[in-house]
Amino acid sequence: MLNAHDILETIRMIDNEHLDVRTITMGISLLDCCHSEIDVACTRIYDKITRCAKDLVKTGEQIEREFGIPIIHKRISVTPIAMILASCDDRDAVKIAKTLDRAAVDCGVNFLGGFSALVQKGFGPGDRELIEAIPEALAATDRVCSSVNIGSTKTGINMDAVALMGQTVRRAAEMTADRGCIGPAKLVVFCNAPEDNPFMAGAFHGAGEPDCVINVGVSGPGVVRAAIAEAGDCDLTAVADLIKKTAFKITRMGQLVATEASKRLGVPFGIVDLSLAPTPAVGDSVAHILEEMGLECCGCHGTTAALALLNDAVKKGGMMASSHVGGLSGAFIPVTEDAGMIAAARCGGLSIEKLEAMTAVCSVGLDMINVPGDTPAEVIAAIIADEAAIGMVNSKTTAVRVIPAIGKDVGDELSFGGLLGGGPVMPLSSYSPARFIGRGGRIPAPMQSLKN
């Protein structure tokens, strides 16, 4: 039973500590929209999305008003479009992207994810066409997000796809250079991509998912930081227990919203993703949680250990609060979206090498990092390969979302606005991995893949 203390505590979290439900994401299968004629397929795609999601935004707003819980984004994820494209005689992926964008606008959602391809073991029909179309598709749309899975623990890493994605990220930046290089900010390259992730830009609706489903992503870094601050100089075991209890409360709120949205929309409830998703707002930072634990600056020695504690405690607390936890779940470290990370990068306390180490123990990977505008495609590909290797060997999801800041160099600033934030251009190694990337082929799956 809720008592007055619980209610007042939740109100304080919402009013003062940036507690929110970051997203309600409706996953929609488009497998029944396949057709050899692309215009017919586009009509089917638009009709199904607008039919299934017509009440999504309205329902989210009703829940916000009735429960007083901020729901920041309402989003849609769809079947990886490369699968739909494979059935078309004319594989014009950009035409489908524009259809998705129109459907997203008409439904009123913030983003639509699923302009995606799964190529961890090789390229199937429609995959190359979609990947080659990503830069133009992201330049021609406002709300469409894209992702490509290039590796997994079971299959290894498709290095031909890695090389292609290095070129794709760079072209996406060049084609949106007049808009702050926004293209790569809507593009994620995965290893071990989950099928039920509600967070953009990596959301897509997996082939094993229901026809339509509701997934919810919660947040609340500010709540965790405030709880640690209030606890004072306790030891790290007590810190972990405190984070678990706080994550439980945050996740219960997400579970409530997910259950209500599912019931009102008549759509099955899928999962709660209990990731701590930061924003550029002061007081809503994962980096500030780590600093509250005792680090002088996020990125100093000890950061990886502190992040491991945080990520583990968040998952333990969240799993007690919901029987259906999924997606990514843990702590995000997107540089431009986290006020503490931005400050640490600006002062030189946080490097891309330290961020890579941190990704071994947290959710996702090298996320929203601005790199010099003249960074070659093979260097971007090598960054992707390094991060994929961490995911492959550790049987976890990792991802890369780097933004070549066209026309800018180390120390310059690149801003996107909104939740995507902005931050400094970070330095990279000056030595070339070109010969390694040029070899192509596949990095074989590790021994731990043989679990059958």
Image (cartoon, helix red, strand yellow):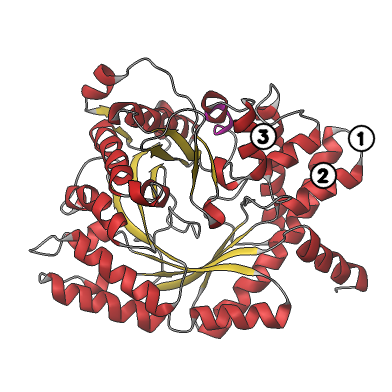
Closer to the chain start, of discs 2 and 1, is 1
- Is residue 412 found left or right of 380 in the rendered image? right
- Residue 425, given in percent of the width and then of the height, sits at 49, 33
Q: Which residue is mark 2?
A: 241
Q: Tell me the quadrant of the picture where the C terminus can be found.
A: top left
Report the amino acid beneath label 1.
Asp
Q: Residue at 86% x, 44% y: name it.
A: 229
Q: Tell me the quadrant of the picture where the N terminus can be found.
A: bottom right
Q: Which residue is mark 3?
A: 308
Res 438 → quadrant: top left
Q: Nearer the viewer, residue 56 or 344?
A: 344
Q: Within 10 Å of the Cα at label 2, are there few (<14), some (14-19), or many (20+) other Cα atoms?
A: some
Above-or-below relation of 54 to 125: below
Q: Within 10 Å of the Cα at label 3, are there few (<14), some (14-19), or many (20+) other Cα atoms?
A: some
Closer to the chain start, of discs 3 and 2, is 2
Secondary structure under the numbered disc 1 in the rendered image: loop
Above-or-below relation of 117 to 309: below
Numbered label attached to residue 233: 1
